[in-house]
């Protein structure tokens, strides 16, 4: 017998005021439901069932390519009704852990506490004490402190509204009690819904025990019902990620102004200035410094490299001792060898840039193979596109390209060649020679400055 995890994700999320179902709204760059699924997988359960209903097609599309079992809740008649739809799919006898698609920060270690608790409880709930209990179900205890019910906010009397301990939405139900508890639910309440929370009351009436495990960090079980709560949870997530980086020794200039939407592998003495966004898989070597307002995605940056402010780097491999920016745009397929310098207003794409080469100002380097110790003058453009196809530019070691040059691909500039400034190079330039393609400079002696005509009155 193993564990079945059921994730409830069929609701519309009316309070989000959105055409998209709530559970696919993104938190740190991925659907909130994805966070719950990822956490579930860490527990290695026998089954993961996702209950979908409202705009199910959109939810399935957002979760595409993953092995998930879906159960449809055609009409959203409440959280208890959602679980009831799964009774035929859950492997008989399995213990069930119910998670909510709108409680995305939950951690596997916390769930393990519920699953592995050594008690005879038929139902275990994860409770918490939020700063503001508005909207949450309240955990009602008897005189002997044992849990006897969860009362929804809308159904609670003033005395119950004063209870600080709330239901997180996370509950485990013992396999041998599941059928009996779920089929006993009714919808006799203010919202006319089948509440999952009523299994507590029913279990207790049957003479069973219900255990509440208090979640130490209330942030971890914050529910998201509206845009304000989504932003608040995003802020919690941000802080958590910044804390993790600092715990590994990174200097974060302001932990409230960094967004890590993925994983960062970190060397020693890394410094990250304000307002940087990291997405996907990132690796930052020893002593890497990232300036303010950089966006870095799926990239590795070698030791001692400096990324100056306002730089965007996407799917690139950056070597050691490299300097990039400010205001550089490094696009997918860029590979910079050690000691490369990419300056301001430079765009690169599918470009291999050899050791120590410099592209210092205002250039576009695309579909290019560049050797080492090359100097590319300001305003140089590799013209890689003929309107139909892309072509390659090859630049040998030690080449010097004068400013404002166009290299019309396919073209090769052989090693140690020099290109005169202002050239349009359409044919291969030989090694060790000066190649220039501009017209000779002339001065027109007969020319005179135009004179402004007086206005006719
Ligand atoms: C629920 C709990 C409340 C708890 C809070 C924690 C119930 C009755 N109430 O309230 O005690 O404190 O979560 O955040 O359970 N869903 C379905 N089908 C439905 C209705 C909802 O799949 O018919 C899904 C939603 O998509 C959502 C989750 O269940 O992911 C919770 O639903 P929601 O309506 O947000 O419940 P709350 O009012 O927040
Ligand atoms: Ca909710």
Image (cartoon, grey):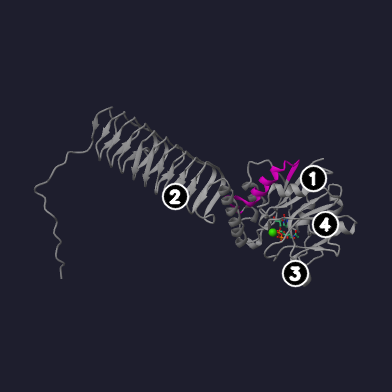
Residue 271 location in percent, x, y? 48, 48
Instruction: Check disc 1 and report its element: helix, strand or loop.
Output: loop
Mark 3 or mark 4, whichever is nearer to me: 3
Q: Tag 3: Cα neighbours inside 10 Å, few (<14), some, or many (≥20)?
A: few
Mark 1 or mark 4, whichever is nearer to me: 4
Q: Residue at x 42, y 45 (%)?
A: 329
Q: Is residue 217 left or right of residue 140?
A: left
Q: Is residue 271 magenta?
A: no
Residue 102 location in percent, x, y? 67, 55
How far apart are labels 3 and 1 at the CA level?
37 Å
How far apart are labels 1 and 4 at the CA level?
17 Å
Residue on which the image places disc 3: 162
Q: Which sits in the foreground, 140 or 249?
A: 249
Count of numbered tags: 4
| The magenta segment | 25-48
Residue on which the image places disc 1: 90
Q: Which numbered marker is on residue 291?
A: 2
Mark 3 or mark 1: whose residue is earlier in sequence: 1
Mark 2 or mark 4: whose residue is earlier in sequence: 4
* Residue that sits furthest to the bottom in the current view: 158
């Amino acid at each position: 017998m193993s564990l079945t995890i059921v994730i409830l994700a069929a609701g519309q999320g009316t309070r989000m005021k959105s055409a998209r179902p709530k559970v696919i709204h993104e938190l740190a760059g991925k659907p909130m439901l994805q966070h719950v699924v990822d956490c579930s997988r860490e527990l290695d359960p026998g089954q993961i069932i996702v209950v979908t209903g409202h705009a199910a097609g959109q939810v399935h599309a957002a979760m595409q390519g993953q092995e998930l079992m879906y159960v449809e809740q055609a009409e959203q008649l409440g959280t208890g009704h959602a679980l009831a739809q799964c009774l035929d799919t859950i492997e008989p006898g399995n213990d069930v852990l119910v998670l909510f698609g709108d409680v995305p920060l939950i951690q596997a270690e916390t769930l393990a506490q519920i699953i592995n608790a050594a008690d005879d409880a038929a139902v275990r709930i994860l409770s918490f004490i939020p700063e503001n209990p508005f909207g949450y179900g309240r955990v009602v205890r008897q005189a002997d402190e044992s849990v006897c019910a969860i009362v929804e906010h809308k159904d609670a009397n003033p005395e119950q509204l004063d209870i600080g301990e709330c239901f997180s939405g996370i509950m485990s139900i013992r396999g041998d009690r599941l059928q009996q508890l779920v089929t006993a639910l009714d919808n006799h309440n203010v919202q006319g819904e089948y509440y999952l929370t009523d299994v507590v009351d029913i279990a207790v009436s049957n003479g069973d025990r219900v255990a509440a495990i208090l979640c130490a960090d209330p942030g971890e079980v914050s529910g998201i019902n509206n845009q304000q709560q989504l932003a608040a949870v995003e802020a919690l997530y941000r802080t958590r990620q910044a804390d993790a980086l600092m715990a590994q020794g990174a200097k974060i200039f302001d932990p409230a102004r960094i967004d890590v939407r993925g994983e960062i592998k970190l060397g020693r003495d890394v410094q990250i200035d304000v307002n940087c966004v990291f997405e996907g898989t990132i690796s930052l070597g020893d002593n890497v410094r990232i300036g303010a307002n950089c966006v870095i995605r799926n990239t590795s940056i070698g030791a001692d490299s400096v990324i100056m402010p306002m730089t965007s780097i996407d799917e690139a491999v950056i070597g050691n001792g490299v300097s990039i920016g400010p205001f550089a745009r490094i696009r997918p397929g860029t590979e910079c060898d050690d000691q490369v310098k990419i300056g301001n207003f430079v765009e690169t794409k599918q470009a291999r840039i050899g050791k120590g080469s410099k592209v210092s100002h205002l250039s576009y380097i695309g579909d290019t193979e560049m050797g080492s110790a090359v100097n590319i003058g300001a305003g140089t453009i590799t013209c890689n596109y003929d309107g139909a196809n892309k072509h390659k530019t090859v630049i040998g070691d030690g080449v010097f390209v004068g400013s404002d040059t166009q290299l019309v691909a396919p073209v090769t500039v052989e090693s140690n060649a020099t290109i005169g400034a202002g050239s349009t190079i359409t044919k291969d330039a030989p090694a060790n020679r000066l190649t220039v393609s501009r017209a000779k400079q002339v001065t027109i002696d007969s020319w005179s400055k135009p004179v402004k005509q007086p206005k006719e009155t």
